[in-house]
Amino acid sequence: MDDFLRRLPKAELHLHIEGTLEPELMFALARRNGVSLPYASVEAVRAAYDFTDLQSFLDLYYQGMSVLRTAEDFHDLAMDYFRRAHAEGVVHVEMHFDPQAHLARGVELATVMEGLGQARRQAERELGLSTALIMAFLRDRSPEEAMQLLEKASPYWETLDAVGLDSAERDHPPAKFQAVFERARRLGIPRVAHAGEEGPPEYIREALDLLDVCRIDHGVRCLEDPALVERLRDQGVVLTVCPLSNVRLKVVERIEAHPLPRLLDAGLRLTLNSDDPAYFGGGMLANFRACQRAFDWSKSTFIQLAGIAIEAAFMDETRRLSLHRRLAECS
Ligand code: ADE
Ligand code: ZN
């Protein structure tokens, strides 16, 4: 089974590239850029990753990314992750990135785009990995700032596969960002949003109705609203679920109590993802393995989930067909 899970061609649709920053690279970049960290060692960083909720994680996540300053840093961050993901049998990575968190530290959007762009081209060339880019708006900042970012990103609109919505969910409903998502829609940029991670089912409805998203990131709290579950099923909306993230951020108490089996039984279209693998105890393979251990799923369930990820990915149809063919060889 373990060999099967590794060989399965896995498409990752929910990943924050800043959340792939391992403590070793954090220290190396801090040294390279003369940034001081409030930790004595790599072990001390890992020991600090004991989260009580989403906000307690976000505090460390934003602090950790302070070491990212140059295009080379963003390149090294992404390439490091792409190599690890490739070794786990990941064939496609869609990465959220958080420009506002970098702009606030004086790091220009062009710097981020240059570094990530170089890494994407290198990953395609050297690893045969396809990638997509999702520019996220920080929902705990103002909608005006989000709109400014979308306009600032005009030289890159063609490069963006989607825009997304992330950061602290509580008290920051999707409705706040209706205008900026409407602008993205008019520009022809697809839209996704985190909803129903810590926030109520109502935020999932808002993301669908007001932001016109094609996927919901997380969405696990939909189960509290049976009519919403029915709607998600009937419309075939994909939820990008992150099991280990949900455990670490105390969305669920332990993996065995995760609603994944109930979501599957409800007929929803799900994918498995790692969210912030450096902070939550592992990448795609660790998430697949955790589900295997907790739910004793058969190979066909994993093939079904991997197939949904390929169907719902931002990729050209030639690539999609070739990945579906690779997946068919696994059964
Ligand atoms: N940013 C990075 N990881 C996140 C998560 N799990 N939820 C919301 N915002 C995030
Ligand atoms: Zn996320």
Image (cartoon, rainbow, N blue to C red):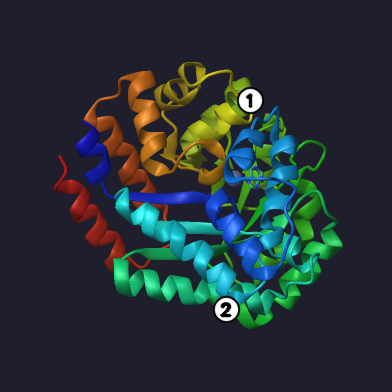
Disc 2/disc 1 C-alpha distance (Å): 35 Å
How many residues crowd around disc 1 within 10 Å: few (fewer than 14), some, or many (20 or more)? some
Q: Is residue 177 left or right of residue 136?
A: right
Q: Residue at x 64, y 74 (%)?
A: 70
- Label 1 element class: loop
Q: Residue at x 53, y 62 (%)?
A: 77
User: Which residue is under mark 2?
Assistant: 114
Q: Where's residue 329, x and y in %?
A: 14, 48
Q: Is mark 2 within 8 Å of ligand 1?
A: no
Nearer the N terminus, badge 2 or badge 1?
Answer: 2
Q: Is residue 308 left or right of residue 318?
A: right
Q: Where's residue 114, x and y in %?
A: 57, 78
Asked whether residue 112 appears in the rendered view, the answer is yes
Quarter the C terminus occupies: top left
| Residue 76 against residue 287 in the figure, above or below | below
Indicate the quadrant where residue 29 lies.
bottom right
| Residue 188 against residue 6 in the figure, above or below | below
Residue ranking furthest to the bottom:
155
| Residue 169 against residue 16 in the figure, above or below | above
